[in-house]
Amino acid sequence: MKKLVFFFILLGFTLPNLSAQNAVVHDLKVQGNKKLKASFIKNISKIKPGVVLDSTIIEQDILRLKRLPSVSHAYYQVFPSEDNQYNVFYNIEENFTLIPSANIYTTNDDEFAYRLGLYEFNLLGRNITFGGFYQKDIYSSYAINFRAPYLFSNKLGLAVNHQDLTTLEPVFLMNEPEPSDYKYNNKSFEVLGLYEFDFKNRMELGINYFVEDYQYKFGATSSNVPQELNVHKWLLKGVYEYNKLDYFYQYVSGFKSQFNFQYVTSTNDMLPDFFIGWNDFFLFKRVGEKGNWANRLRLGLSTNDDTPFAPFSVDNNLNVRGVGNTIDRGTGVIVWNTEYRHTLYEKGWFVLQGNAFVDAGTWRNPGGDLGDFSKNDNIKVHPGLGLRFIHKKIYNAIFRIDYGHGITKGTTNGFVFGIGQYF
């Protein structure tokens, strides 16, 4: 008798599952989109008419849509059609995607620089990014960028970039207490192929041709370091990304890892061939209803040449807030950025968010060893506070202001302004 009862219980659980497995998608419908093309959404979605109805696949589609710059939020609904078929509705809340960008940074040394740009993140309604920026950091610079992740198919895309970047760069000479200053220009053209393996994994692979030009301005000199350099280079570039991030308006949760590797060939022995590789690990966690804990850890190494033109920099706008604009260089890097973001006020489209952060980093000296990472002179620690003014319906419309205060040897303090979260 007990076996018979168990059989009917088991049958009761099995029949609904079999029925669900036989459920088929009759049609995929898109609602709420205005500029974003419904045909594009259907092309990149895994759910298609005629496939088995699977909530796991639908949820992955929704996560993919929420990662698009043109989508502020997305959700789905399922309604029965006929003969065990169902209509799936993807509901889209769009972002405004023609976005100006601005980054301003200062230190207590009265250093001031800015970058202004304009980008369209949903060109032709197909998630294509096109735009550029102008930068003033003593000298003028500009860049033009094109990126279409799904240009050829729902997996294959293309990116093309050009930049003409000019800055005043410190060059650190051995046995000299103060750096020399060089006018540095980098003019480059880059082409990348973009490929998405699946929902979580993607890669970029391409080539970059660039010319580096160094011109001495003032400071210490050395007979071993030329005062002028003009070098033509080729760069092979690869990027691999694993992404499990989930977005809910200004909140982010999950894990992401991005590995970058570059091999650079040179035509000058002063700037020899070298490789550089680094990995960024991101971890985000929701804290209650209004909190978000955000972390970024960067680990990087390059060829350990004893050169004043080392590739990793210590920079205000890249890794340590308030430290200054390119104050040091190295052939290895360890940087940890951690911050707690808390929504102070939210009404309709507007969010005011506060944050408390600690930026900490250390570098390996050119030609040095791994022990350099533990030297006091190489360690920079900057805690600080900041504010975020967020528009929930405009992509990346986050105006940020942070103040970082150095607490380690020889560090400075300063403000960093910008568009978008720091990381």
Image: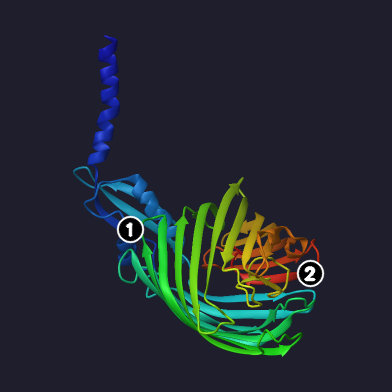
Q: Is mark 1 in CB contact (under 8 Å) with mark 2?
A: no
Q: Specify whether 1 is left or right of 377.
A: left
Q: Residue at x 44, y 67 (%)?
A: 238
Quadrant position of residue 123: bottom left
Q: Residue furthest top?
A: 1
Q: Residue at x 30, y 27 (%)?
A: 13
Element at badge 2?
Answer: loop
Residue 96 at least partly seen: no
Q: Amino acid at mark 2?
A: Thr
Residue 52 at least partly seen: yes
Quadrant of image for the N terminus: top left
Q: Residue 418, relative to residue 224: is it above or below?
A: above
In this orientation, which residue lies closer to the viewer: 99 or 263? 263
In this orientation, which residue lies closer to the viewer: 406 or 105? 406
Q: Specify whether 96 is left or right of 37.
A: right
Q: Residue at x 78, y 64 (%)?
A: 406
Residue 328 position, x and y percent, is 70, 72
User: First in sequence: mark 1 or mark 2?
Assistant: 1
Element at badge 1?
Answer: loop
- Disc 1 designates what residue? 45
Quadrant of image for the C terminus: bottom right
Q: Amino acid at mark 1?
A: Ser
